[in-house]
Image: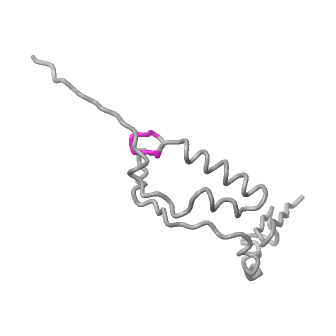
Amino acid sequence: MPTKKVVTTTSRRRRSEFEGFSFTRDNLSDSPGILGDYRSQAWSAFENLPYPTTTDEAWRRTDIRSLDGSVMLPQAETYLDLPPIPERLLTPLVSDQHGGQITLLPGGVKTELSA
């Protein structure tokens, strides 16, 4: 019985296949302090890692073809004029108090933890 010859080829997806994002590393300079450092490190990782494909085990069932590259980063301090969080969203869903709550606010974070 003749054996069937199986030929397997593998290749990495080239960056040129992705249309790219609508922002560049230059847009990251608007980010202040720790956030700017975090975004800069993330951008470096983005530049150095290959795009995932369906042959990568962790991405095997994830279709990234519809990844939206037109997403823009918010400009510095555009969040300062946001309205306050409605009180109804801060009330506990169960019981009379939260076990803990983290609220993202313009200019910072408010953290409350029950003892």
Q: Is 33 drawn above or below residue 51 in the view shown?
A: below
Residue 81 in percent (x, y) is at 75, 81
- Display colour scheme: one colour
Q: Is 56 drawn above or below residue 36 in the view shown?
A: above
**Image quadrant in which the N terminus is located:** top left
Residue visible at 18% across and 23% down? Answer: 5
Q: Quadrant of residue 8?
A: top left
Q: Quadrant of residue 39?
A: bottom right
75 sits left or right of 57 in the view: right
Residue 102 in percent (x, y) is at 78, 64
Residue visible at 67% across and 48% down? Answer: 41
**Image quadrant in which the C terminus is located:** bottom right
Residue visible at 45% across and 39% down? Answer: 57
Residue 17 in percent (x, y) is at 38, 51
44 sits left or right of 105 in the view: left
Q: Nearer the viewer, residue 19 or 109?
A: 19
Report the magenta stretch's main SS. loop
| Count of residue discs | 0
Q: Nearer the viewer, residue 86 or 107?
A: 107
Residue visible at 76% across and 61% down? Answer: 32
Residue 53 colored in magenta in the image? yes
Considering every residue shown, the one lying at the far right of the view is 115
Segment tinted magenta in the rendering: 51-57
Residue 66 colored in magenta in the image? no
Considering every residue shown, the one lying at the far left of the view is 1
Residue 9 in percent (x, y) is at 30, 32
Considering every residue shown, the one lying at the far top of the view is 1
